[in-house]
Image (tube, rainbow, N blue to C red):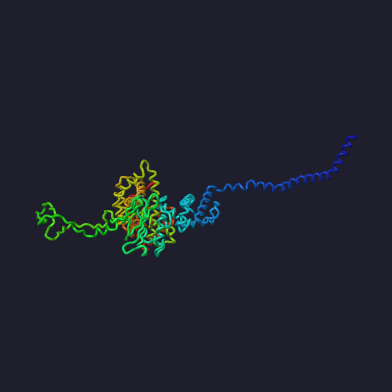
Amino acid sequence: MFTKISIRIVLACSVALSPAVAAANDALIGGIVGGIIGGAISNQPKRQTTTKRVYKPAPVKRTVNTAQREANRQTQEALNYFGFNAGAPDGVMGRNSRAAVTAYQVHLGYPATGQVTQFERDFLISSYYRAQSGGATTAQLIAQHPQGVRGLLLTYRDEKLNGGAGSSAIAGHYGMPPVVAAAVNEIAKSSDPSAEQLIQRSGFVQLADINGDGQTDYILDTSVTGSAFWCNAQACAVRVFASTPDGYERNDFQAFNVSPAMFSCTRGTCSKTNDGSQLATAQLIPQQPAPVPTLPNTQMASIQAPAGVATPVPSAQPVVNGSTTVVNSAPTIPNFFGGSEGTAQSLTSYCAKVNLMTSANGGFVTEASFSDPSFTLAEQMCLTRTAVMAEGDDLIAKVSNVTPEQVTQQCRSFGPLLKEHVSAVSLKSRADAIAGVSSFVLSSGMSPQQLTATAKICLSVGYRVDDMDVAIGSALLLAALGDHAYGELAGHHLSQGIGATKRTDLAAEWYTATLTALADGANPVFVPNQGERLALLQLATSSLTGGATVSEPVQMQIPQLIVDQ
């Protein structure tokens, strides 16, 4: 009984106290939940901050191209060295760097794009390292060149174009060896024209390999200066600089109407010869017959023979009657040059002269500076010659079991085989010349692939050894085999009159056909990275013909030979 009463009392108390306990429990739970949420809110910024510290820097570091940045840094350092302000070398090609690249391109006559090509960068970096390691030689070249440190780029470029290196290469003021440049300055001091103007005067600087060592020798003819200081009544001062392994030796002469044939050099020592200056005159002077011992009262017999009967030709005997009997010989074509080949101009010497003028002008002709179509085409001729020789060197290196000397010897035999077709370039239209070469291809017995490789190698050899029959003949072969871009070379030889007769009308036809082929997608084999070159070639071709439109070349019905590249 007591137990039941106790239970009831406990239950009643619990019922009476339940609202207060519930309220207390709600408050307790609310406090716990509020603390958790509040802690989460207060701790949330810490978790976000920690996340940013861990992950934010990672993507930035992974996007950096270390190799490219290092290459850019080298480019900037080289630009700064040569006086093109690229700013701090930080590896980022920004506005300052692009402006420096543009100035560098303009300086060397490259297209001014602000984006350096691989060719332009390679030349810039190699020039930078060469200048850095040059020591006293670099300092001397900088002091001698009117453009200072920037002139090094012109000097190195001219060496590359001329295929020279070392002490025998063209290097120095006006693109000439220092000793020659000093003589130019000496002559200019006593003449009205400046040194730069003298260099561009025809005949003042003459280039030839007089001593036969394969290097360019220099002749300075003061008769073109117009200054009486260097001349007397009969002759003018002439400076001849002959190349030696140790540099150039100067030889002083007095002469008039100078030509390289007037001099003979052995190493650095030169002397005058009479044959060079008097050859043409001697051939034109009638020669008096030398006294011949004769028999008295003898006359040349004249015998009439029946028709159809061959009679012996009597020997001619002079008549001694106080007069001389002249025996008429068969008509012949006069030759005033004493040799079967005449006086062919050397393309090597010609390009050396062109490169000197290019250097004096501060770089290659551009569309903006264009004025003389003939000189512009001369520059392009020498530029393509350099590109051809570089390609040929690479191909010769791949020929197994044959030395370069053997390659040269074999390519020289190419000239006589193609001489007829080379001569036709000066006389026939492009279509007729190509047709003739195509017949040669069909009768050669060689596959187009073999002929293409052979022609590319021999084209390089022809330019290197100054054999124009080999060079032009190889270019014609390549054009006939489908490499139409090589037709540009025929145009150059016709426009400049080297290896071919100077025919601007035929040259324009070759140029137009080449430009048309390139516009239709032909492979640009010469300096393909210089897009402005073709526009300049088009401009020069148009000016060469006086703005006249050249008719489209006639397409010959010849086999379409596909050459594997």
Q: Position of residue 85 (x, y in %)?
A: 52, 56
Residue 510 place in picture, x, y as percent: 35, 56
Task: State the residue at coordinates (73%, 46%).
Answer: 39
Residue 461 vs 252, above or below: the answer is above
Question: In front: 146, or 73?
Answer: 146
Q: Residue at x 55, y 54 (%)?
A: 88
**The quadrant where residue 289 appears:** bottom left
Residue located at (88% from left, 39% from top): 9
Residues 424 and 192: in front is 192
- Residue 427: image location, x then y, percent: 29, 57
User: Can residue 467 be seen from the camera position used here?
Assistant: yes
Residue 231, image x and y in percent? 34, 63
Query: Which is more toward the observer, 197 or 506?
Result: 197
Residue 480 seen in the current view = no
How many numbered callouts?
A: 0
Q: Is residue 392 left or right of residue 95?
A: left
Dividing the picture into quadrants, the one containing residue 334 is bottom left
Q: Nearer the viewer, residue 438 or 317?
A: 317
In the rendered image, the quadrant that contains the N terminus is top right
